[in-house]
Structures are given as structure tokens and as C-alpha cells.
Image: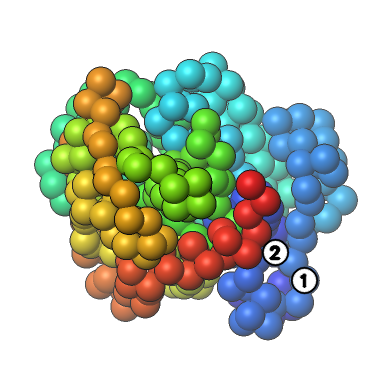
């Protein structure tokens, strides 16, 4: 990508999109297109079509999506499948119609089967049943992958799809009703510390294992792949290491400085037992993450306390 290439970051106000925007800006890209949801509703096909017709971006990072944690996914499946299918369809089709040179589609590790062999290789896609609590979101993301591959096959487009592991970092969603596990834990332990609560309740048994990647590492990988990867085959982005939810809770507790106890509510769902990505395909290209989990949680907690209004 030339430094003056016109680049559209769809979803630039979200966790992933804002990190990609930071990365591109830090590397000196000077012609970055962004539109807030109020300025451009990507579920509106006519509006999306008109935007591409007027702006003609050369490169697109498709980070716009409706996202949420296990509670939100399980409660609003219709919203998750409908909005994500609309966004993907409108942006990918517009990118083809208006001659985008390359598009990077952000998928999710939840596309893989619930009981996929660990660590999960890219060819595990569609080899088994999905985790039921986020099935609607996963199916929408799988449709986005298959749409990119279909446009590559039929129209010779250069649309790539990346599958990030669980993400966290500055700008994350800390709402307890819709957030993912790590930001939810940060907020729970912080509020428990402020209010001198004797214990913090964590959903599930604490035994599931999860992999976490700082969003600034993800954005670094996305820009790297936009420059260096042209295959229609999906590619995983992760750190290659995982941790139990219990270990994660203890780590967050210590970083926040909470001194009470942790209670696990095993009446709540655990979700997928383990979700660790095989990142050998990405690592073979010469990329690796730089931010350790403890370092990343410390910086994210600082960002949270600087921006928290509770």
C-alpha cells in the first residue's frame, strides 16, 4: 500500500477499527476514510453503495460488526445474524463493484466448531457443530468468509479473511450486559475494590481455556497481512498461548488490586471448553505478537480507569 493510497476503515470507532486506524496513522498513511455509524449506516445497501461510488477507496479494512459477549449473543441472536449479514453483503459487494484493490475481512475464532481439535487449524472450519450460545454471530461471520472467497473465485477479487482470537485493549466495551470476559472482569474487580465488596462472582466453572490478544497486536498483524498475504484461504491471528478463566480472573484481580475472594457461578454457561488457535500459518510469514498478557491487561486497566465514569 502506498502511503497516499485511499484506505477505508469500516468500523473505525470500535475496538478493532480504532486500533487499525492508530496503526495506519502511525505508519504515515495520509488518506484514510472513516465514517461513524450516524454518518453511514452500513446495513443500508443504498447508502453503502453511494459511499463507495463517491469515494472509490483502494483498500478496505472491514472491521465494522455487531459484537458482544456470551450474554448478548445468547439474548439477541436475530440482531447479530441480521446486522452482520447486511454489513458484510453491502461492503463486500460495493468493494467489488467499485474496484477496490484489496479488502481485509475481520472474522472471529468463534467460526470454528465447538469441539474442534486444539490448537485450531484453519481447515477446521465447517468440520463440526458450533457453540450454540453464539451460533448466529458465527454463521454470519462464516457467510462473510464464504462471500469473500466466492468473489475471489468468480470475479478474481483480492479479498482476504483473518480470524482473530479473543481481543482486548483500549476502547473495549466494559458494559457488563454486553462485554466480553476480560473487560467484564476488569470492571467487576474495579467496582468491587471501590465498594469494598467481599467477593466477585464470575460466570461458569472457571475451567474453560481462552487465548487473548491485545488489539494493537491484531492491528499490526492486519496491516502486515494487507501488505503480505493474498490467499483466499482464511488465516488465524493469535498468540498461540491460552489461560483458564480462573487464572485470568486471578490475574485481573491482582492487577486491579482487589483483595476479596472470587466465586464461580457454575449455573451459568461456560461456552466452548477451549479455544486456542493454531497460528503457524501466520508465524511462517514472519509475524509475531509483541505485547504480553500481563502487560496488556495493565495498560488496558489504566485506560479504563482514565476513562471510567462509574
| Residue visible at 56% across and 59% down in the picture | 304
Residue at 21% x, 61% y is: 241
Is disc 1 surrounded by few (<14), some (14 to 19) or many (20+) residues within 10 Å? some
- Give me the residue at 23% from left, 62% from top: 240
Label pair 2/1, CB-CB below 8 angstroms: yes
User: Disc 2 and disc 1: Cα gap in Å?
Assistant: 6 Å
Residue 299 image point, x, y percent: 48, 70
The residue where tag 1 is placed is 31
SS at badge 2: strand
* Mark 2, other Cα within 10 Å: few <14 / some 14–19 / many ≥20: many
Q: Nearer the viewer, residue 273 or 60?
A: 273
Residue carrying label 2: 7
Q: Earlier in the sequence, mark 2 or mark 1?
A: 2
Q: Residue at x 71, y 72 (%)?
A: 5
212 sits to left or right of 301: left
Q: Nearer the viewer, residue 268 or 291?
A: 268
Q: Against 69, is 13 above or below?
A: below
Q: Tag on residue 283?
A: none
Amino acid at each position: 500500500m502506498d502511503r497516499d493510497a485511499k484506505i477505508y476503515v469500516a468500523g473505525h470507532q470500535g475496538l478493532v477499527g480504532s486500533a487499525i486506524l492508530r496503526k495506519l496513522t502511525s505508519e504515515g498513511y495520509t488518506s484514510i476514510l472513516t465514517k461513524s455509524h450516524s454518518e453511514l449506516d452500513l446495513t443500508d445497501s443504498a447508502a453503502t453503495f453511494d459511499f463507495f461510488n463517491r469515494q472509490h477507496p483502494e483498500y478496505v479494512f472491514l472491521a465494522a460488526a455487531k459484537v458482544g459477549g456470551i450474554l448478548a449473543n445468547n439474548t439477541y441472536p436475530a440482531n447479530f445474524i441480521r446486522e452482520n449479514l447486511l454489513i458484510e453483503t453491502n461492503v463486500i459487494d460495493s468493494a467489488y463493484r467499485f474496484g477496490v484493490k484489496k479488502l481485509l475481512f475481520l472474522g472471529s475464532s468463534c467460526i470454528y466448531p465447538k469441539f474442534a481439535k486444539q490448537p485450531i487449524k484453519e481447515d477446521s472450519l465447517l468440520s463440526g457443530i458450533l457453540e450454540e450460545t453464539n451460533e448466529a454471530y458465527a454463521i454470519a461471520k462464516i457467510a462473510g468468509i464464504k462471500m469473500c472467497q466466492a468473489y475471489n473465485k468468480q470475479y478474481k477479487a483480492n479479498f482476504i479473511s483473518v480470524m482473530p482470537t479473543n481481543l482486548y485493549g483500549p476502547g473495549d466495551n466494559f458494559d457488563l450486559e454486553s462485554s466480553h470476559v476480560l473487560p467484564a472482569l476488569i470492571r467487576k474487580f474495579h467496582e468491587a475494590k471501590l465498594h469494598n465488596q467481599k467477593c466477585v462472582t464470575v460466570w461458569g466453572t472457571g475451567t474453560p481455556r481462552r487465548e487473548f490478544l491485545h488489539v494493537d497486536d491484531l492491528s499490526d498483524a492486519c496491516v502486515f497481512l494487507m501488505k503480505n498475504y493474498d490467499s483466499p484461504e482464511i488465516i488465524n491471528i493469535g498468540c498461540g498461548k491460552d489461560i483458564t478463566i480462573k487464572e485470568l480472573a486471578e490475574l485481573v484481580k491482582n492487577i486491579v488490586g482487589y483483595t476479596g475472594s472470587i466465586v464461580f457461578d457454575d449455573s451459568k454457561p461456560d461456552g466452548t471448553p477451549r479455544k486456542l488457535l493454531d497460528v503457524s500459518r501466520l508465524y511462517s510469514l514472519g509475524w509475531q505478537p509483541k505485547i504480553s498478557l500481563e502487560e496488556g491487561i495493565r495498560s488496558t486497566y489504566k485506560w479504563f480507569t482514565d476513562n471510567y465514569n462509574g
